Amino acid sequence: MEDARDPAAANGEARGTVWTIGHSTRSFEEFLAPLAEHRIQFLADVRHFPTSQRVPWTAKTSLAKALSERGIAYEHVEALGGFRRARPDSVNLGWRNSGFRGYADHIATAEFSAGLDLLIAIASERRTAIMCAEAVPWKCHRSLLSDALLVHGVRVVHILSPGKTQDHRLTPFARLHGTQITYPATRKRLKARDR
């Protein structure tokens, strides 16, 4: 069992970079500014439901059109979306939050692997960002998706605000088995807000 904190570095050269961003309650212009700052060419929407009543511009069709007009390709990658139910026999008991535990269970599925492979292939050719709703990644399944990208040799950079980014670090209680990740119970279990 491996327990590297920086798997991308351990695997040598990173296989590209993926940025992450949450739309939160930002206006479209506020959302677009950091994408332009990082010269993003492709936005992968990893929301399970690509819509928001609170933030109407984030609806899949509207967002795809608005981004296209600015030279940014868009795709909803449902296979990487959140809102997954935890399995009754989940090995990911390190997460108290059932939503995070459910997503950790989803990481082990063929559906997730296919979505991850697609994302890695796109990121190897174009400057790519993944987007969900939460402003900060540690309150979002993006953090677990970022773990998966990291162990596959992809550098992950979280866009926190204009001019402010943070490189992703593997969740401290994650356990690696090759490129498979589990989050077993430890003495100190973390909630999303504890990260």
Image (cartoon, helix red, strand yellow):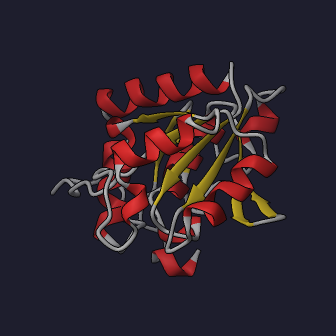
Q: Position of residue 90 (x, y in %)?
A: 26, 54
**Relative image position of residue 39 (x, y in whole percent):** 77, 40
Left or right placement of residue 49 versus residue 163 in this view? left
* Residue furthest to the front: 69
Q: Looking at the image, which is closer to me, 141 or 102? A: 141
Q: Where is residue 27 drawn, in percent x and y? A: 55, 69
Q: Is residue 52 left or right of residue 150?
A: left
Q: Is residue 187 visible?
A: no
Q: Which residue is at a point 48% across and 74% down the rendered structure image?
A: 192
Dividing the image into 4 quarters, which one contains the N terminus? top right
Residue 121: name its quadrant.
top right
Q: Nearer the viewer, residue 119 or 10?
A: 119
**Quadrant containing the C terminus in the rendered view:** bottom right
Outermost residue on the left side: it is 88
Does residue 100 appear left or right of residue 163 in this picture?
A: left
The residue shown at (34%, 60%) is 101
Horizontal placement of 24 versus 62: left or right? right
Q: Along the line of sight, which residue is nearer the eye, 41 or 118? A: 41
In percent of the image, x 39 and y 41: which residue is there? Answer: 80
Q: Write down the quadrant of residue 2 in the picture.
A: top right
Q: Could you tell me residue 156's position as x and y percent?
A: 70, 46
Q: What's the residue at 59%, 23% (across, down)?
A: 122
Above or below: residue 135 compared with residue 22: below
Mark yes or no: residue 152 visible.
yes
Residue 167 position (above or below residue 74): below
Q: Nearer the viewer, residue 21 or 51?
A: 51
Total labels drawn: 0
